[in-house]
């Protein structure tokens, strides 16, 4: 065949490389594309396509290519089509190929007609790997549907009618999707998609950041959706198990098993558990930090929680029974052998003490076999050590190599000696290395297969270096302990409820808690003088409510004492021939009150307005009301905590601590109340979440949350007026479900509807604000009678 | 109704408590036994009653108990009212050992009834009958309580506490506890040892989420279940984990301990 000159010359077809292949010729004819870039790609892919696809599919493939080539969008879509479509068909199967093609072409056409035409090629680039990850046509169909919806939702329009701005995040999203689908299920990916779309539909730059995996929200959502057990969720069980089995306490640090690479998406990283021990004079004082992978899946029939437990047990065993060795004089292969021997000793001890662990350990141990490693090409030391270790743990394994078998017996003999310790095991390991060394062990290629045992740690604790090395310090450091800063505590992250998505936005709001600065306590006392009459009235009511003395319940059938009056009446009835009442006993009971109240005050800027009908500001009236309430509660003996909040976007919600449960209503707390400065906005949900934390940890029988507000929840960075209202409603519902009694006092009658949405019937509207002190106190007494 | 203890209640002495109790009884001193639930307090007193061959009356105290529950009350019938003695009065009359179990659960106005019986007067005034019952020379009062449940509300007043001599009880040491299990239920020594190991691990969680550790009584129940043919792991879950906590994390941790200990 004479060589050809690829080009636009159609007459060159006769002398093209495929002149004697009618199928390829037919394909080229069908494709009928005159774009220069296409022909080399066609040549490269045609034979593969013919091999992989059935004739009908092939026909449809090239016809679709024909359509794509004529759209006027350049060669890219067609090139992507030719390259990746066969892969998709392979992933989903031939029987669905036609339907899938139709759906994909439909989506591509939609993209072509919309401003998103540049996304056509990226869609096809990602479709192949995506199809492989998803594995089935139904999932792929759902995927295409999601992409289509996403495109519609994020394609911007001016004047709201004609779609005219391309979706900012679509191309990045398509690029990152294949790697994400390796870590997340389709639902998880859809949740990630949904979140970004709802949160950033109107913020193009942030949308791009989110979908190119550069923003922290994106990572937080991905982490939430990853399948597998998060270490954070397992942490408590691991702590409890450690305490129960070893009487030890440790701090757990999650080690990231995935890193986000801007170019490549989510990359999996393999991490080994590690332990760091700061030893003190007594074992109980040791500070132990254990690093564990941040997410684990089930493996080899062993559940993720059991994998975590094994890792923890192994490290705890090291802490108890291993002693560090000096590493400077030993070569890397010697050190590796010592580590393997010591790990084997520890694991054997674990199996002996807790026979229930044997099953999962043997299931997780890699199925290493003798002879797998080719000594001619690879260094086999690790492989030998792995076989050795496995044969010690599972004595039923027959060893072909007599030498290894001999070492196994020597090892077991050593372990039977009650005086065995790390040093002696290390000596044996060194002998092992010396005696079983092969010249091939120093080759560059190391055989790693089946040499990583799932639960074993990296053994950094086993080595001490006298000379400084250049190893980087990769020890897991404790995250900054909560040293109280002078002004505010480190921010706490809280989720926020997104009603439209029906889901929480994780770690969305930052709350900074401040100790409220103090003012003049005498100001409060002055205010209270005004309400002298009210306080006297309240005192009488409080005295009645105070738990003292006893109540008597009469007319009981089984009480504690005979009620003589009723007994005489019953006796008279008997004599009169009537049937006597059986209920002639009575019972005395002490009155008890066990109540904790958390008061949350809205300190937003609207408090500085003047209250209608008076000369005071809403703020001053609120201060009076709260002081009276606090005094009343201190008389009654109930626990009260007071806090105020205001917010300036979701990154800066401030919670001002005015009075804690343990503090009494005295000079200091009065001074803080006096110094309130209203400002900013009202992000109520976050404040309620933060305030409810100390309340929930109280041990009272009854818990109450009072919210004092003069507006509706709103914030400068939220455009949807209902969003924060729904968020507040969600947290109120959650608290009520946990048994907290929630009540709201609304100072501004205009905001009745939003308060009713949030609190339902549990709200009091104050029409005449100068009556607030009386209303608040009476409300409290009524609710807690 | 006979109050005598007929069969010997099994009790394994942990120290010299038997001799000390006999000395206290010889002087008819009121005795207080303190310790966590299910560690053998009631069993010990029952054993001593059998040993000393005295009648033995137990009263389980609770929040609703009133003084009349202990002393007695008038009951109504066709003939009119008649007085019925409560357990404390019965014991005082007949010279029995009266054992008030978990006395701190009762209200304090109830417990002061025993003050007159526990000092040199040894008499019980019954106001409603205007009678003063003088205690039989063989009468002795014993109370038990669990100091771990102390709260500000529920505690014995000092005036009550200081009328008694006290014995401290705690869960036995591992080998003794295993012995008790073998003696009570007939389970093998190996199984008893594993059960005690599990109990020790669970007790380490006291204060970290568990208010009270696993009691010897629950271990005995577990052993009984195992003797009945229930698999050891299932028996442990049923008797050692499910009753003591509803916290999901603690249950899972204890389940893991159990799975690890049984082959």
Image (cartoon, coloured by chain):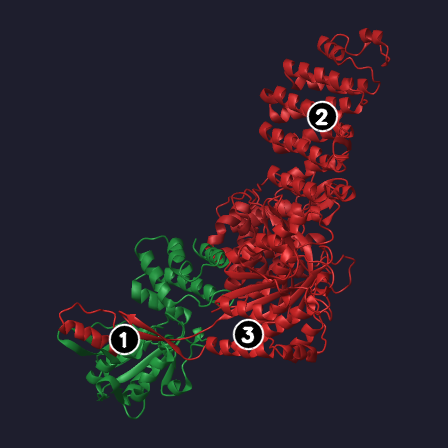
Q: Nearer the viewer, residue A205 or A444?
A: A205
Indicate which label's residue lies in the foreground, 1 or 3: 3
Where residue A242 sits: x, y (%)? Answer: 54, 61
Q: Which chain is disc 2 placed on?
A: A
- The quarter of the picture where residue A23 lies is top right
**Considering the numbered disc 1 on the image, is that residue within a helix, a strand or a loop?**
strand
Residue designated by label 1: B58
Is residue B172 positioned above or below A110 on the image? below
Of all residues, the one furthest to the bottom in this rendering is B120
- The chain coloured red carries which letter? A
- Neighbours of disc 3 within 10 Å: few (<14), some (14-19), many (20+): many
- Neighbours of disc 2 within 10 Å: few (<14), some (14-19), many (20+): some
Residue designated by label 3: A633
Residue designated by label 2: A110
Indicate which label's residue lies in the foreground, 2 or 1: 2
Is residue B66 positioned above or below A468 on the image? below
Residue at the image position 43 percent from the left and 53 percent from the top: B263
Residue at the image position 73 percent from the left and 65 percent from the top: A608
């Amino acid at each position: 065949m004479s060589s050809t000159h690829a080009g636009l010359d159609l007459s060159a077809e006769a002398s093209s490389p495929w002149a004697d292949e009618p199928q390829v010729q037919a394909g080229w004819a069908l494709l009928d594309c005159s774009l220069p870039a296409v022909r080399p790609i066609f040549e490269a892919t045609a034979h593969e396509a013919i091999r992989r696809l059935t004739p009908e599919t092939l026909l449809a493939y090239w016809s679709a290519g024909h359509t794509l080539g004529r759209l006027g969008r350049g060669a890219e879509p067609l090139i992507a089509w030719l390259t990746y479509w066969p892969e998709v068909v392979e992933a989903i199967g031939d029987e669905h190929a036609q339907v899938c093609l139709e759906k994909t072409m439909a989506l591509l056409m939609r993209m072509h007609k919309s401003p998103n035409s540049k996304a056509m090629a990226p869609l096809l680039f990602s479709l192949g790997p995506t199809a492989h990850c998803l594995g089935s046509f139904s999932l792929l169909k759902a995927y295409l549907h999601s992409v289509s919806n996403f495109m519609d939702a994020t394609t911007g329009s001016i004047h709201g009618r004609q779609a005219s701005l391309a979706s900012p995040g679509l191309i990045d999203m398509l690029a990152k999707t294949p790697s994400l689908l390796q870590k997340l299920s389709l639902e998880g990916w859809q949740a990630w998609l949904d979140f970004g779309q709802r949160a950033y539909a109107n913020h193009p730059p942030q949308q791009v950041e989110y979908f190119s995996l550069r923003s922290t929200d994106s990572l937080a959502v991905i982490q939430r959706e990853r399948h597998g057990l998060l270490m954070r969720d397992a942490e408590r069980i691991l702590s409890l198990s450690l305490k129960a089995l070893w009487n030890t306490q440790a701090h757990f640090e999650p080690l990231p098993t995935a890193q986000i690479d801007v170019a490549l998406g989510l990359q999996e990283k393999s991490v080994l558990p590690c332990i760091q021990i700061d030893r003190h004079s007594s074992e109980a004082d040791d500070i132990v930090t254990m690093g564990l992978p941040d997410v684990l899946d089930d493996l080899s029939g062993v559940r993720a929680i059991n994998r975590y437990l094994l890792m923890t047990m192994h490290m705890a065993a090291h802490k108890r029974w291993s002693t560090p060795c000096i590493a400077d004089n030993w070569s890397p292969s010697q050190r590796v052998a010592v580590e393997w021997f010591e790990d084997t000793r520890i694991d054997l001890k674990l199996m002996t003490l807790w026979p229930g662990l044997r099953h999962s350990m043997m299931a997780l141990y890699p199925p290493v076999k003798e002879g797998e490693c080719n000594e001619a090409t690879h260094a086999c030391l690790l492989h030998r050590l792995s076989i050795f270790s496995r044969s010690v743990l599972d004595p039923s394994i027959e060893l072909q190599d007599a030498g290894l078998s001999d070492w196994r017996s020597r090892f077991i003999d050593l372990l039977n000696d009650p005086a065995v310790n790390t040093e002696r095991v290390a000596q044996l390991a060194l002998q092992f290395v010396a005696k079983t060394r092969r010249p091939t062990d120093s080759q560059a290629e190391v055989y790693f297969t089946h040499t990583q045992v799932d639960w074993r740690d990296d053994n950094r604790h086993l080595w001490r270096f006298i000379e400084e090395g250049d190893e980087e310090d990769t020890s897991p450091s404790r995250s900054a302990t909560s040293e109280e800063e002078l002004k505010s505590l480190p921010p706490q992250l809280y989720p926020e409820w997104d009603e439209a998505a029906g889901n929480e936005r994780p770690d969305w709001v930052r709350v900074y808690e401040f100790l409220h600065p103090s003012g003049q306590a005498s100001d409060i006392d002055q205010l209270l003088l005004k309400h002298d009459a009210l306080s006297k009235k309240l005192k009488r009511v409080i005295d009645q409510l105070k738990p003292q003395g006893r109540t008597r319940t009469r007319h009981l059938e089984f009480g504690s004492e005979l009620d003589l009056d009723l007994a005489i009446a019953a006796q008279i009835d008997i004599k009169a021939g009537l049937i006597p009442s059986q209920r002639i006993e009575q019972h005395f009971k002490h009155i008890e009150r066990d109540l904790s109240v958390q008061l949350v005050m809205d300190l937003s800027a609207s408090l500085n307005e003047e209250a209608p009908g008076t000369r005071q500001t809403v703020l001053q009236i609120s201060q009076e009301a709260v002081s009276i309430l606090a005094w009343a509660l201190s008389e009654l003996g109930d626990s009260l905590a007071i806090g105020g909040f205001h917010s300036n976007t979701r990154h800066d919600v401030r919670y001002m601590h005015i009075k804690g449960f343990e503090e009494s209503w005295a000079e200091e707390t009065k001074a803080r109340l006096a110094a309130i400065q209203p400002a900013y906005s009202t992000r109520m949900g976050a404040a309620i979440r933060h305030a409810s934390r100390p309340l929930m940890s109280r041990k009272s029988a009854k818990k109450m949350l009072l919210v004092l507000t003069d507006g509706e929840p709103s914030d400068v960075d939220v455009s949807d007026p209902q969003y924060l209202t729904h968020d507040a409603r969600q947290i109120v519902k959650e608290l009520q479900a946990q048994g907290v009694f929630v009540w709201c006092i609304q100072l501004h009658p205009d905001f009745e509807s939003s308060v009713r949405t949030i609190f339902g019937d549990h709200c009091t509207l104050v029409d005449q604000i100068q009556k607030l002190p009386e209303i608040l106190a009476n409300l409290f007494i009524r609710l807690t009678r | 109704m006979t109050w005598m203890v007929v069969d010997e209640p099994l009790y394994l002495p942990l120290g010299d408590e038997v001799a000390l109790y006999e000395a206290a009884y010889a002087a008819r001193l009121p005795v207080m036994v303190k310790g966590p639930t299910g560690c053998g307090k009631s069993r010990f007193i029952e054993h001593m009653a059998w040993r000393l061959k005295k009648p033995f009356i137990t009263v389980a105290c609770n929040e609703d108990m009133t003084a009349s529950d202990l002393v007695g009350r008038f009951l109504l019938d066709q003939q009119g009212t008649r007085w019925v003695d409560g357990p404390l009065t019965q014991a005082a009359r007949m010279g029995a050992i009266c054992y008030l179990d978990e006395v701190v659960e009762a209200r304090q106005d109830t417990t002061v009834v025993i003050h007159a019986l526990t000092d040199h007067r040894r008499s019980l005034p019954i106001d409603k009958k205007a009678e003063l019952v003088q205690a039989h020379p063989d009468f002795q009062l014993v109370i038990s309580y669990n100091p771990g449940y102390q709260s500000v509300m529920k505690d014995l007043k000092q005036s009550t506490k200081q009328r008694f001599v006290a014995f401290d009880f705690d869960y036995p040491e591992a080998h003794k506890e295993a012995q008790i299990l073998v003696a009570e239920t007939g389970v093998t020594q190996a199984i008893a040892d594993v059960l005690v190991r599990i109990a020790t691990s669970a007790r380490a969680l006291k204060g970290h989420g568990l208010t009270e550790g696993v009691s010897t009584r629950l271990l005995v129940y577990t052993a009984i279940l195992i003797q009945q043919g229930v698999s050891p792991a299932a028996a442990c879950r049923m008797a050692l984990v499910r009753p003591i906590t509803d916290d999901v994390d603690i249950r899972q941790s204890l389940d893991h301990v159990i799975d690890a200990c049984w082959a």
